Image (cartoon, rainbow, N blue to C red):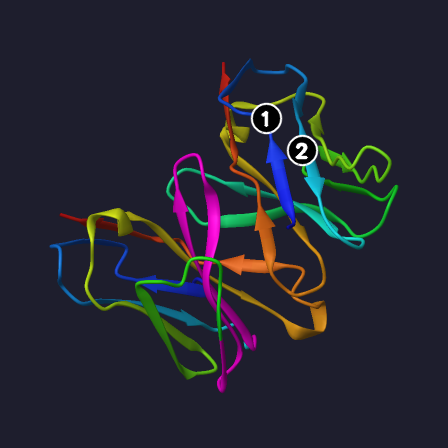
Amino acid sequence: GDSVTQMEGPVTLSEEAFLTINCTYTATGYPSLFWYVQYPGEGLQLLLKATKADDKGSNKGFEATYRKETTSFHLEKGSVQVSDSAVYFCALNTGFQKLVFGTGTRLLVSP
Amino acid sequence: DADVTQTPRNRITKTGKRIMLECSQTKGHDRMYWYRQDPGLGLRLIYYSFDVKDINKGEISDGYSVSRQAQAKFSLSLESAIPNQTALYFCATSDFTQGGETQYFGPGTRLLVL
């Protein structure tokens, strides 16, 4: 079945460091790919998405590129801030209107 | 006001009790979902509904039931709660015109079953 694999956390960085959170997927067909973010005590919010191969999603300084050849959708940010501390979820949608989530990666950014 | 609200936000109950978690939305979306979140397991789909007359089981529906009382309301019930149902529960909605691609989540209900 469809699945998403994320790197385990926590990822601990200093402010202004470069961030990469790895995400790979297994899916039949051509899924849409998403990154959701969960801030402490809140629900999930869509961060960015990409709907086809080679698309790049971007938002709030975060970017991810849909790589069909490596079945990956890694999340990157050039300079993280303390306010970016949260749990990040990679997810896919194969067209049946249901999301399949990864297990989440916690990011901790220190001043 | 939040677009997707959940009540209660926190609940402690005892094994064997029946409880209901409620979700309301003001986004006008047809599609609604219930997920549970457990540490290290991500989010797993319990039930989903594409309109008032449509209810579907997700991957972990055993021990749960749902009711779609109106387009805006989708309730999750635990008929006889057990400790391994202790989790964080999220309701979500999505818009048909978006093909369900973007889901909007409520703030969650933290449930503890003793």
Specify whether B81 is left or right of B7.
Answer: left
Q: Amino acid at mark 2?
A: Cys
In the rendered image, residue B82 lying in the magenta stretch gets the answer: no
| Along the line of sight, the residue nearer the viewer: A17 or A71 | A71
Specify whether B74 is left or right of B27.
Answer: left
Q: Whole-percent x and y of residue A48?
A: 69, 45
Specify whether A74 is left or right of B86.
Answer: right
State the mark number for residue A23: 2
Q: Whole-percent x and y of residue A59?
A: 70, 41
| Along the line of sight, the residue nearer the viewer: A18 or B88 | B88
Q: In this figure, which residue is indicated by the disc labeled 1?
A: A7
Near mark 1 (Cα within 10 A), the count class, few <14, some 14-19 or many ≥20, is some
Contact between labelled residues 1 and 2, with CB atoms less than 8 Å apart = yes
Q: Whole-percent x and y of residue B63?
A: 30, 63
**What secondary structure is marked by label 1?**
loop
Q: Main secondary structure of the magenta part?
A: strand
Q: Residue furthest bottom?
A: B53
Q: Amino acid at mark 1?
A: Met
The quarter of the picture where residue B5 lies is bottom left
Label 2 marks a residue whose chain is A
Q: Whole-percent x and y of residue A110?
A: 48, 15
Question: Disc 2 versus disc 1: distance between alpha carbons?
Answer: 7 Å
Q: Is residue A72 above or below residue B61?
A: above
Q: Where are the magenta residues, as a range?
A: B29-55
**What secondary structure is marked by label 2?**
strand
Label 1 marks a residue whose chain is A
The numbered mark, 2 or 1, whose residue comes first in the sequence reads 1
| Along the line of sight, the residue nearer the viewer: B21 or B16 | B16
- Residue B3 shows in this picture: no
Q: Is residue A52 above or below residue A96?
A: above
Q: At 70% across and 68% down in the image, what residue appears?
A: B99
